[in-house]
Image (cartoon, rainbow, N blue to C red):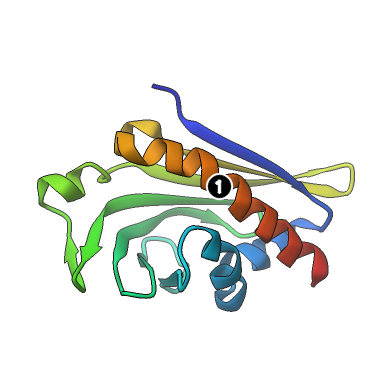
């Protein structure tokens, strides 16, 4: 199976797009396309843990695998958060474990080309159609956030 890849050209410099991606209020806005109340608990530093949570406090546990500010972020998924508990060892969490989600920002003709890649081997099959449907909506919201600031 191929990776899932989503590309969006944004009329803003990479620094603004980076801020739109990862600054807390901005992150909450564009990721609401996935679930209302979406947020991340992290400091976005190399090796730091990330809790990607919805309004109920459920979601994913991941880590910052690589970061080059304003250029590249690689997130390695470790497991899930269910009922407020981090789970990195159950069969359910194992479906997500070890997969990477990468964000590449490139300058093209004064705009920023954002490429988001998700390793499909780490995505449970029942989520692939969901991501194919939802990522474009999320990137449209991100574009609005980055271009208005």
Front residue (pair 14, 92): 92
At which x and y percent is residue 91? 11, 45
Q: Position of residue 69 (x, y in %)?
A: 61, 60
Q: Quadrant of residue 58?
A: bottom left
Residue at 38% across, 69% down: 54
Q: Residue 122, can we see it?
A: no
Q: Is residue 58 left or right of residue 93?
A: right
Residue drawn at the location 18% of the way across and 44% of the way down = 94
Q: Nearer the viewer, residue 23 or 58?
A: 58
16 over 2 or under it: above or below: below
For the point 56% across and 68% down, which residue is it? 27
Identity of the residue furthest to the right in this view: 109
Q: Quadrant of the N terminus?
A: top left
Residue 146 left/right relative to 82: right
Disc 1 target residue: 135
Q: Position of residue 47 (x, y in %)?
A: 37, 61
The residue shown at (10%, 51%) is 90
Which image quadrant is residue 124 in?
A: top left
List the single residue furthest toward the bottom: 25
Q: Secondary structure at mark 1?
A: helix
Question: Residue farthest to the top?
Answer: 1
The crowd level at tag 1 (other Cα within 10 Å; few <14, some 14-19, many 20+) is some
Q: Which quadrant is home to the C terminus?
A: bottom right
Q: From this viewpoint, is residue 115 visible?
A: yes
């Amino acid at each position: 199976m191929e990776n899932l890849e989503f590309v969006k050209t944004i009329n803003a410099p990479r620094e603004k797009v980076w801020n739109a991606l990862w600054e807390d209020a901005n992150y909450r806005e564009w990721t609401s396309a996935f679930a209302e109340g979406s947020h991340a608990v992290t400091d976005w530093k190399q090796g730091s843990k990330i809790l990607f949570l919805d309004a109920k406090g459920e979601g994913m546990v991941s880590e910052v695998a690589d970061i080059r500010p304003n250029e590249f972020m690689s997130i390695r998924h470790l497991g899930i958060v269910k009922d407020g508990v981090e789970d990195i060892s159950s069969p359910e969490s194992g479906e997500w474990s070890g997969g990477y989600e990468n964000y590449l920002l490139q300058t093209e003709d004064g705009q920023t080309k954002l490429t988001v890649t998700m390793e499909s081997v780490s995505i449970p099959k029942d989520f692939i159609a969901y991501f194919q449907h939802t990522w474009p909506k999320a990137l449209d919201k991100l574009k609005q956030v980055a271009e208005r600031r």
